[in-house]
Amino acid sequence: MVRKTADKPEETPEQAGPLDRHLRDYAGYNIKRASNIMQSNAAKALDPYGLRITTFSALCVIVDNPDVTQSQLAAALNMERSNTVLIIDSLEEINLIGRFRVPTDRRSYALRATLAGIKRRDAAARALAKAEEERLVNLSPEERAQLADLLRRIDPLD
Amino acid sequence: MVRKTADKPEETPEQAGPLDRHLRDYAGYNIKRASNIMQSNAAKALDPYGLRITTFSALCVIVDNPDVTQSQLAAALNMERSNTVLIIDSLEEINLIGRFRVPTDRRSYALRATLAGIKRRDAAARALAKAEEERLVNLSPEERAQLADLLRRIDPLD
DNA sequence: TATTGTTATACTCTATAACTATA
DNA sequence: TATAGTTATAGAGTATAACAATA
């Protein structure tokens, strides 16, 4: 790799401002940065409960929707069916959920949370809500609702 | 793995609404979903220019800040120094940027975009802006500014 | 001692293709 | 044929530790 020497270092940048000033014009860049912060914050909050963001999300859907199938779960969380398998496996291994055969369609499994799963979800959900609360302290309730609304209009969800 | 049979399938869910209704109360969940959409949209827009999101972001910073160092770049993009290396490598391999030794501090490299790098950045930036425009068509200019402001208050940036 | 760039490594998330068993 | 779950695999992003060269 041939590397030359900087013979004429720029004394002042062409334009003032932060190094990423151009990127800040992109909604995707701002969303990604905020998302990274929220994700690492959430991961830290969930870790004491033995859950990652993906396993917590799946557990939430299963607790709230008894007998949901893996395909339905994948669709709800906007992920590939194949990627749900290991997530479900790890929740089943620690006895937070169970797979049950559906008599009327033996291809699919009905997923149900155990009592331990429900308790774990509830405790983790409270911890996560608290962690988000601390992180979003700069936003009023109205602003948080507004943020959710704007984001929903990027991702139609339903 | 012992799997039982669902002997009492729930006819109706405990509560109405989408499967992920509980998760939608979390800002992190909504941000992540919107972020995924913006990211895949951006990746598609940048692909024809031979750039990924990470290489485009780095190229942007280098074009706008001649002689930036790798450590400064890492700090600006909120990433680890070690992870900039391969990104810089790939930009250098296709001759969009160059590493130049700094006489006053021989530990660091000054990064500079080539003419081709500047042109590639400009073309890719236009394509990305257009792709975002299409994706954000449901948001007015005021709402986009508001979104950026709310996100910035989650990620203080400066 | 501290910093810059680097290498190696590992973990997670994501995406695709192909397989099986059932429908 | 089509669908549900599964397996294998690969790419990308992210994080940590340790090293050489330099300050």
Image: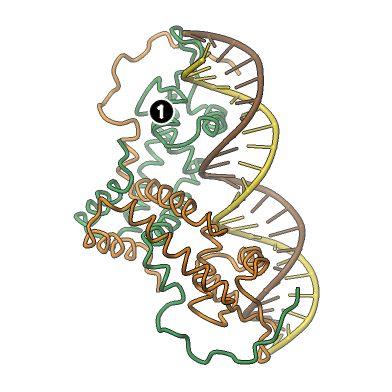
Chain colours: A orange, B green, C yellow, D brown
Going by the image, does B23 lie left or right of A50?
A: left
Q: Residue D7 appears in which quarter of the rendering?
A: bottom right
Quadrant (top left, top right, bottom left, bottom right) of the C terminus of chain A:
bottom left
Q: Give the residue pinned by disc 1.
A: B62
Going by the image, does B80 lie left or right of B136?
A: right
Q: Nearer the viewer, residue B25 or B42?
A: B25
- Spot the residue most to the left: B142
Question: Vertical placement of C20 versus B66: above or below?
Answer: below
Going by the image, does B23 lie left or right of B137?
A: right
Local packing at callout 1 (Cα closer than 10 Å; few below 14, some 14-19, many 20+) is many
Q: Position of residue B140 (x, y in %)?
A: 22, 59
Identify which residue is drawn at 36% across, 60% down: B27
Question: Vertical placement of A99 versus A127: above or below?
Answer: below
Q: Nearer the viewer, residue A89 or B55?
A: A89
Q: Secondary structure at mark 1?
A: helix
Identify which residue is drawn at 42% across, 84% down: B15
Question: Vertical placement of A72 versus B72: above or below?
Answer: below
Q: Position of residue B103 (x, y in %)?
A: 46, 7
Quadrant (top left, top right, bottom left, bottom right) of the N terminus of chain A:
top right
Q: Position of residue A137 (x, y in %)?
A: 28, 52
Q: Residue A6 appears in which quarter of the rendering?
A: top left
Q: Position of residue A40 (x, y in %)?
A: 46, 49
Identify which residue is drawn at 50% across, 43% down: B52
Q: Amino acid at mark 1?
A: Ile
